[in-house]
Amino acid sequence: MPTPSMEDYIEQIFLWTEKTGEARVSDIAESLSVLPSSVTKMAQRLDKDGYLVYERYKGLILTEKGHKVGKRLVRRHELLEQFLRLIGVDKENIYTDVEGIEHHLSWNAISRIEGLVEVMEANPSFIEKLKKTVRDREEN
């Protein structure tokens, strides 16, 4: 399993590849607010671990393993954003909250959250009940 730091890089490489067809060291550095040399160092590590193919002065290319992990990481991020939105977390807090929790939850917990999101979306009355409960609690 990749470390949380490795996950951040794989996720960004996956997103850039999906968005533009390629992931460049400079793009990943900007996205993660790190130096290009840090991206290069991580790319070499990810290459060694089989997540991507790194060739100096060329784009970062995810392997099948890296693509699969990247897709899963993006789905996890989107799911957690969706969950926090459903339970009424303030919009301006969602991204920061997801970044803070996504690496600390097991895949088992993610699976349970995914099930909960499905149930909540299928039962809008549950969401309304939750909102009312939170409003009532905040008023007291």
Image (tube, rainbow, N blue to C red):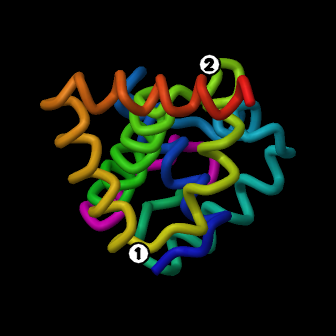
What quarter of the picture does the N terminus occupy? bottom left
**Which secondary structure, mark 2?**
helix
Question: Magenta stretch?
Answer: 56-66
Q: Kindly identify the residue that appears in the image at 18 percent across and 42 percent down.
A: 119
Residue at label 2?
91
- Expressed as whole percent of the image width and height from the top left, the position of residue 50 reads 41, 75
As measured in the structure, the alpha-carbon distance from the residue carrying label 1 to the one carrying label 2 is: 37 Å
- Expressed as whole percent of the image width and height from the top left, the position of residue 76 reads 39, 50
Seen as rendered, the residue at the extreme front is 140
Q: Kindly identify the residue that appears in the image at 59 percent across and 53 percent down.
A: 9
Above or below, 12 against 38 in this view is above
Seen as rendered, the residue at the extreme left is 122
Depth order, front residue of 103/28? 103
Residue 60 visible? The answer is yes
Residue at label 1?
50
Is residue 120 part of the magenta span, yes or no? no
Eye-nearest disc, 1 or 2: 2
Q: Is residue 93 left or right of residue 131?
A: right
Q: How many marks?
A: 2
Depth order, front residue of 101/37? 101
Q: Kindly identify the residue that appears in the image at 67 percent across and 42 percent down.
A: 97
What quarter of the picture does the C terminus occupy? top right
Above or below, 67 against 111 in this view is above
Indicate the amino acid at tag 2. Answer: Lys
Residue 27 visible? The answer is no
